[in-house]
Image (cartoon, rainbow, N blue to C red):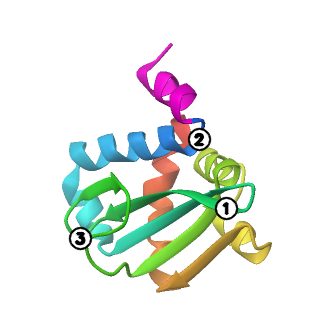
Amino acid sequence: MTPSANKLAASGLKSDAIFEYIIEQVKADPNKAKSVGGIFLYKVTKDGKVVKQWTMDLKNAKVYEGEPESKPNTTLTVSDEDMLLLSEGKLQPQQAFMKGKLKITGNIMMAQKLTPLLKANSKL
């Protein structure tokens, strides 16, 4: 069992492994993260309720659990299950948004810059 799988079993959220992977990628290549720029707040839901928040501060190449230290440019609300499908490429962000599975507030155009960063995570 991989460390990510152990964390997954402990937390009960499938998306935790995705964010752990993103943290590793940002540490490995902070300049790629900084090229996206912006602060993104992910609100992960389960059964229609927000159960966890993750901040991707790509201005400073930091990803962490919890609220952002400063106002996010974009807030994305997505279910745990749909986050997994998005990262695997089985659900396209535009389709998810149109179907109401992905809610975006703030700078929607900035959210499109995340696609290449998340596509790299399809190896999960």
Q: Which residue is denoted by mark 3 in the rendering?
A: 59
Q: For the residue labelled by badge 2, is the local secondary structure a helix, a strand or a loop?
A: loop
Q: Give me the disc on residue 49.
A: 1
Which residue sits at x=23%, y=42%? 28
Write the start and end of the magenta stretch as one range: 1-11
Amino acid type of the residue tagged 1 in the rendering: Lys
Q: Give me the disc on residue 13.
A: 2
Q: Quadrant of residue 114?
A: bottom left
Circles 1, 2 touching at the beta carbon (< 8 Å): no
Q: Say which quadrant the C terminus sits in.
A: top right
Sequence-first disc among 1 and 3: 1
Q: For the residue labelled by badge 1, is the local secondary structure a helix, a strand or a loop?
A: strand
Circles 3, 2 touching at the beta carbon (< 8 Å): no
Q: Describe residue 69's horizontal placement relative to residue 9 as left or right.
A: left
Dot 1: few (<14), some (14–19), or many (≥20) neighbours within 10 Å? few
Closer to viewer: mark 1 or mark 2: 1
Closer to viewer: mark 1 or mark 3: 1
Tell me the CA gap for discs 1 and 3: 28 Å
Circles 1, 3 touching at the beta carbon (< 8 Å): no
Amino acid type of the residue tagged 3 in the rendering: Lys
Front in this rendered view, residue 64 or 112? 64
Sequence-first disc among 3 and 2: 2
Sequence-first disc among 1 and 2: 2
Q: Main secondary structure of the magenta part?
A: helix
Dot 3: few (<14), some (14–19), or many (≥20) neighbours within 10 Å? some
Tell me the CA gap for discs 3 and 2: 26 Å
Q: For the residue labelled by badge 3, is the local secondary structure a helix, a strand or a loop?
A: loop
Residue 111 sits inside the magenta stretch: no
Residue 75 lies, in percent from the top left, at 49, 75
Which residue sits at x=46%, y=86%? 107
